[in-house]
Image (cartoon, grey):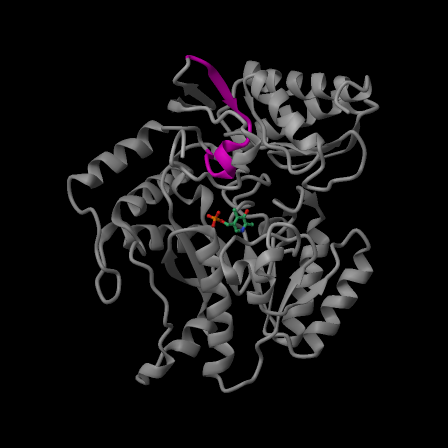
């Protein structure tokens, strides 16, 4: 063995690509041990909303470390968790009355799936089929992978994954709605979907009208509607939740990433009263059986409570709206470039394909683009040849310009045949 013993996430170490060492961060900037300043154009994998080391969130974390570090959350409670739960129920759809804590996006999805099946099992009805949308991503644990797109990421584990119903991505809206209706009519237990933007599937976007229609179909057949807003929540799409734009409330809501402003790992699954009721009993066999050691960790909850205070007291949605406009203008400037296809935007998220429509994740273009952006001092991590820009809302004009200059020079190189 040589070098670091660290085995990195989603990294093919055999390619020998450099792994920068980051020492500190502020706002939209990362600073490396070798003295470089890198623009974080993807919010460190979609988590950082207000900016890195947001001072009042850091201060809340420091204050909590002097009081309570960790507590069993089965049958015990603490003020930061109570505060987060109260704060969430005050700003999320009123139908979502209950808050269950966990520690990552994948885990809050697992919890939502288990709550959906528990709901039907505890009511004595045999509904257990889960329906999903083509190209969706819900996390990397076995259950979350089962409800996500199948492909190179999970081919080796396919024998462990459970069977689900799949509806097409609504590029063909009627086909998607018909497929969903057929699954619901056949008694599907739940439909899980990323509202408005399918993130890891390639920043694929669809409109709020379709989301509302899908919700209505589920409602008509009693199929539970699970909104995975792990990425789309916290202002990314221009509203607190993407679901708001469709005027819909889910039965189960998954939140993580921006829940702490991106500072610490924490997640919640919010549930409607009927789902709580199905588990509420003096019969212990109807308990919701789920926990992890760090469920509702007090320090993470203190960060989330402060994030909620930021949302109450600061103009976060105005910042997101302003970022959306700046993204729109820069995207428009790339329109018509021979190597730029399908430029699109939803709220603060901008995306496009470079060098043609083939978005295969393992396309050779991916590593070349990565190297190009790294050299330009920009943290962009394309999904195949889909390049997307999802920065913290505090990003400055110069940094946004640097991101788009790097994208333009990559597009120019592709158009000139220098990348193939
Ligand atoms: C990132 C993501 C997840 C998984 O979250 P982790 O914290 O990485 O486990 C689940 N769903 C969606 C939509 C995501 O974008």
Residue displayed at 20% across by 46% down: 69
* Residue at point 48%, 76% (across, down): 119
x, y percentage for residue 87? 36, 50
Find the magenta span and give its range: 35-49
Q: Residue at x 58, y 80 (%)?
A: 127
Q: Is residue 357 left or right of residue 145?
A: right
Q: Observer-nearest residue: 193 or 210?
A: 193
Between residues 281 and 262, which one lies in front from this camera angle? 262
The percent coordinates of residue 308 (x first, y second) are: 38, 43
Q: Is residue 9 among the parts visible in the rendering?
A: yes
Instruction: Name the residue nearer the viewer: 9 or 302.
Output: 9
Determine which quarter of the picture holds residue 388: top right
Q: Would you say 359 lies left or right of 97 here?
A: right
Question: 207 or 61: nearer the eye?
Answer: 61
Residue 101 position by quadrant: bottom left
**Any magenta on residue 39?**
yes
Image quarter of the C terminus:
top right
Residue 299 screen position, x and y as percent = 26, 44
Q: Position of residue 73 (x, y in %)?
A: 26, 61
Answer above or below: position of 302 versus 122. above
Q: Is residue 402 magenta?
A: no
Q: Residue at x 72, y 53 (%)?
A: 209
State whether residue 314 is above or below residue 182.
Answer: above
> Residue extending furthest left?
66
Q: Is residue 281 above or below residue 151?
A: below
Q: Which quarter shows the N terminus?
A: top left
Residue 52 falls left or right of residue 321: left
Q: Would you say residue 96 is visible in this rendering? A: no
């Amino acid at each position: 063995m040589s070098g670091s013993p660290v085995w990195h996430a989603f990294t093919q170490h055999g390619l020998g690509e450099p792994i920068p060492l980051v020492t500190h961060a502020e706002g939209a900037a990362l600073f490396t041990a070798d003295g470089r300043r890198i623009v974080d154009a993807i919010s460190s994998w979609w988590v950082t909303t207000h900016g890195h080391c947001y001072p009042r969130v850091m201060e809340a974390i420091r204050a909590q470390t002097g009081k309570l570090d960790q507590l069993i959350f089965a049958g015990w409670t603490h003020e930061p968790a109570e505060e987060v739960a109260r704060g969430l129920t005050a700003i999320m759809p009123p139908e979502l009355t209950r808050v269950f804590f966990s520690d990552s996006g994948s885990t809050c999805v697992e919890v939502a799936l288990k709550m959906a099946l528990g709901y039907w099992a505890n009511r004595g009805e045999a509904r257990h089929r889960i329906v999903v949308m083509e190209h969706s991503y819900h996390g990397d644990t076995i259950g979350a992978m089962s409800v996500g797109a199948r492909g190179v990421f999970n081919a080796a584990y396919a024998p462990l994954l459970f069977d689900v119903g799949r509806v097409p991505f609504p590029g063909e809206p009627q086909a998607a709605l018909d497929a969903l209706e057929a699954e619901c009519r056949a008694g599907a237990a739940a439909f899980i979907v990323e509202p408005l933007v399918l993130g890891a599937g390639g920043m694929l976007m669809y409109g709020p009208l379709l989301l509302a229609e899908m919700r209505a179909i589920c409602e008509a057949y009693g199929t539970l509607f699970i909104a995975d807003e792990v990425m789309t929540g916290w202002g990314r799409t221009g509203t607190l939740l993407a679901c708001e734009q469709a005027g819909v409330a889910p039965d189960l809501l998954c939140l993580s990433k921006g829940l702490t402003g991106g500072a610490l790992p924490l997640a919640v699954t919010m549930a409607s009263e009927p789902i709580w009721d199905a588990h509420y009993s003096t019969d212990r066999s109807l308990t919701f059986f789920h926990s992890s050691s760090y469920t509702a960790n007090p320090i993470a909850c203190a960060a989330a409570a402060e994030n909620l205070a930021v949302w109450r007291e600061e103009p976060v949605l105005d910042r997101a709206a302003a970022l959306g406009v700046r993204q729109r203008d820069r995207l428009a400037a790339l329109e018509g470039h021979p190597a730029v296809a399908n430029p699109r935007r939803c709220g603060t998220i901008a995306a496009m394909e470079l060098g043609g429509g083939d978005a295969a994740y393992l396309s050779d273009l991916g590593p070349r683009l990565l190297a190009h952006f790294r050299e330009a001092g920009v943290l962009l991590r394309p999904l195949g040849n889909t390049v997307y820009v999802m920065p913290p809302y505090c990003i400055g004009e110069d940094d946004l310009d640097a991101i788009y200059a790097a994208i333009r020079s990559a597009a120019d190189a592709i158009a000139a045949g220098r990348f193939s």
